Amino acid sequence: MSVLVVVECDKGEVKKSSLEVASYGSQVAQLLGTTATAVAVGEASEASLAQLGEQGISKVLYDAEPRLKDFVNGAYTKLIAAAAQQEDAKVLVLANSNIGASVGSRLAVRLQASLATNVVELPKNDGGQFTVKRGAFSGKAFAEVVLTGDRKIIAVKKNSIEAQHEAGKTATVESFSAQLSDADFADAPKQVVLQDQAGGILLPEADKVVSGGRGMKGPENWHLIEDLAKALGAATACSKPVSDVDWRPHHEHVGQTGITVSPNLYIACGISGAIQHLAGVNSSKVIVVINKDPEAPFFKAADYGIVGDVFDVLPKLTQAVKELN
Amino acid sequence: MKFLVCISNVPDTTTKITFTPDNKEFNKAGVQFVINPWDEYALTRAIELKEAQGSGTVTVLNVGEADTEPNIRKALAIGADDAIRVNAYPKDAFFVAQQIASIAKDGGYDVILMGKESIDYNGFQVHGMVGELLGIPTVAPAMKLDMSGNTATLEREIEGGKEIVEVNTPFVASCQQPMCEPRIPNMRGIMTARTKPLKVVEPTGDASRTQVTEYQLPPKKQGVKLIPAESAGDLIKLLRNEAKVI
Ligand SMILES: Cc1cc2nc3c(=O)[nH]c(=O)nc-3n(C[C@H](O)[C@H](O)[C@H](O)COP(=O)(O)OP(=O)(O)OC[C@H]3O[C@@H](n4cnc5c(N)ncnc54)[C@H](O)[C@@H]3O)c2cc1C
Ligand SMILES: Cc1cc2nc3c(=O)[nH]c(=O)nc-3n(C[C@H](O)[C@H](O)[C@H](O)COP(=O)(O)OP(=O)(O)OC[C@H]3O[C@@H](n4cnc5c(N)ncnc54)[C@H](O)[C@@H]3O)c2cc1C
């Protein structure tokens, strides 16, 4: 019996969310009195995989097949299922990402496992009952869920667990092959188009986010958002109407019908705080609101606020960050 | 081409979420239920593709009890041809996926569309379960869907970009913006929806693999600390020294 952790890599590095997943998995292994093995997908380097020892992983399986560099649902599912068989994994842990959800849901059927997505805390294992806490109702509530199956798959929400770092510990990296055939790559992408990322920080992975709404008045003013984001090392985001009118691209739209983020810091600039917007950001640890209307509903959900004009306040904040650094 | 569009019945996006006093169930009292917003993309895109092809059918499917019928009728009013309701409480995603897979298989559907995720339970998992149960590809979440003959070209969102994927029918796709502009029912649609067929069938099996034992609301915020606009820079110091997030 073991715990198997699925680690997503990109450009040779383990993604931040996967470091969290690895920490989560090794803590589950401790709870169950066993060890945590990882299986890596994407473009990995041996050095970064070995470093997963710092998160408590003892062994990493890696298939260097070049076609696995990009996400292929069929092939990834087969690879991870084969790793789960080999390691006799009773619990699988992955990121609550587009890859994690795509693969995890197929694995739940293939491995006859109970699946919980959007999980925010370590599980409890009391009297043979395995319970996880997961986000539900678009950030407006949590649910305690018992996973009744023999095998369990847990998709961990980003930024809800802090990755541990035990410096100096390394994992052994073993090459692994699931004997993939061409048929497993039938749904391989024809093309992969990467976004032009301001400052190189991906919104879903970011731990700081600066976000703009209609109060920004137009796309020509977005440099104010970008300057502050750059100074902070933050990603940029926006409200739905802003992406609907193409001031910003759709992948920046956060909220109930956009992406959900849970950074340590979310700065909302000229956003009113409609309930559908809050649904995508309300699990952020600290929320800052800048709005000229003191009655804006967002202030009720905020930790810090400035009642003022974004065109006046944003440059001051950027300046203050630069002075601090 | 036969399209199957799965719709979930969810609390309206403005709903204040509360639970029964024992915290075991969602408190439905006074709550308005709507078609899951993501599912509207799936539905509208299926109708558009059918129209472009000049033939075919769009069937909507819901796994739910009788109280979901107003929203099934709404989907018919938007332009679906017929509907199926699997008469059961949707216990969990695996249960729902089994029902969808069984209907899809028996009905010989070519394209199975659903929303990215339900806004109540936020599972983001029914798509893959249905695909795996049927042994067909799933593309999730899809931002664009075009058909040419039996081949679909989709844009699949990945963290940091998108993949262009081609799959042949049958396949499953879970849809999200900006796939299309969701349609709203017009008067004629509402009139014709009343007479469109809505078949009620009983579920196959009752297997489920998860069980919610309790709901909780997030802890209340302490209240906002306001910083005067004149000394906006002080906010940055507070974020470093007090909140410790920068
Ligand atoms: C089914 C459904 C789903 C939805 N999903 C989402 C979603 O996922 N995400 C989302 O964001 N929205 C969503 N919405 C829309 C949501 O209801 C709001 O309409 C939207 O969030 C408002 O965007 P906003 O705050 O940018 O604009 P507004 O509501 O127009 O707010 C602009 C704010 O800027 C302030 N302002 C103006 N000028 C200045 C200035 N110079 N300085 C400072 N402040 C200024 C104003 O006081 C105001 O509060 C959804 C709606 C529906 C019905
Ligand atoms: C507290 C609570 C109360 C609920 N009350 C009701 C209720 O009163 N009536 C009701 O019908 N459902 C109800 N549901 C069920 C819920 O809406 C889903 O049907 C089920 O839980 C699967 O959700 P998911 O988030 O895992 O699906 P996801 O994987 O997030 O859903 C993806 C897509 O699958 C499709 N889908 C999901 N569920 C269904 C379904 N039931 N039928 C057809 N297609 C579906 C949709 O296209 C959806 O966009 C309730 C759920 C909860 C948690």
Image (cartoon, coloured by chain):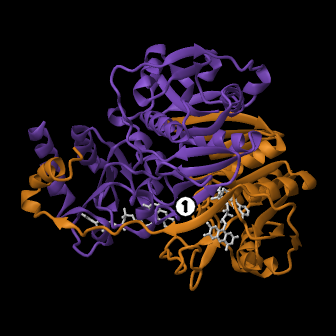
Residue A6, picture quadrant: top right
In the foreground, B9 or A113: A113
* Chain ID, purple in image: A
Residue type at mark 1 is Glu
B246 or A111, nearer to the observer: A111
Residue lying at the far front in this picture: please name it.
A127
**Residue A91 pos. (x, y %):** 61, 40
Q: Position of residue A239 (x, y in %)?
A: 40, 58
B219 on left or right of A177:
left
Does residue A223 sit above or below B38 in this rendering?
Answer: above
Up/down of A118 relative to A184, above or below: below
Residue at 23% in and 41% down: A232
Position of A184 compared to A241: left or right?
Answer: right
Looking at the image, in which quadrant does ligand 2 appear? bottom right
Identify the secondary structure beneath mark 1.
strand
* Image-based side of B154 in relation to A311, left or right: right
Please report the residue visible at 35 percent of the width from the left and 27 percent of the height from the top: A166
The quadrant where residue B36 appears = bottom right
Colour chosen for chain B: orange
Q: Residue at x 62, y 57 (%)?
A: A146
Residue A212 drawn at (x, y percent):
32, 54
Q: Quadrant of the C terminus of chain A?
A: top left
Question: Is B114 placed above or below A28 here?
Answer: below
* Residue in view at x 77 percent, y 49 percent: B130
Q: Is residue B60 visible?
A: yes
The spot of residue A313 in percent (x, y) is: 16, 56
What quarter of the picture does the N terminus of chain A occupy?
top right
* Chain letter of disc 1 in the image: A
Residue identified by numbered label 1: A144
Q: Is residue B157 visible?
A: no
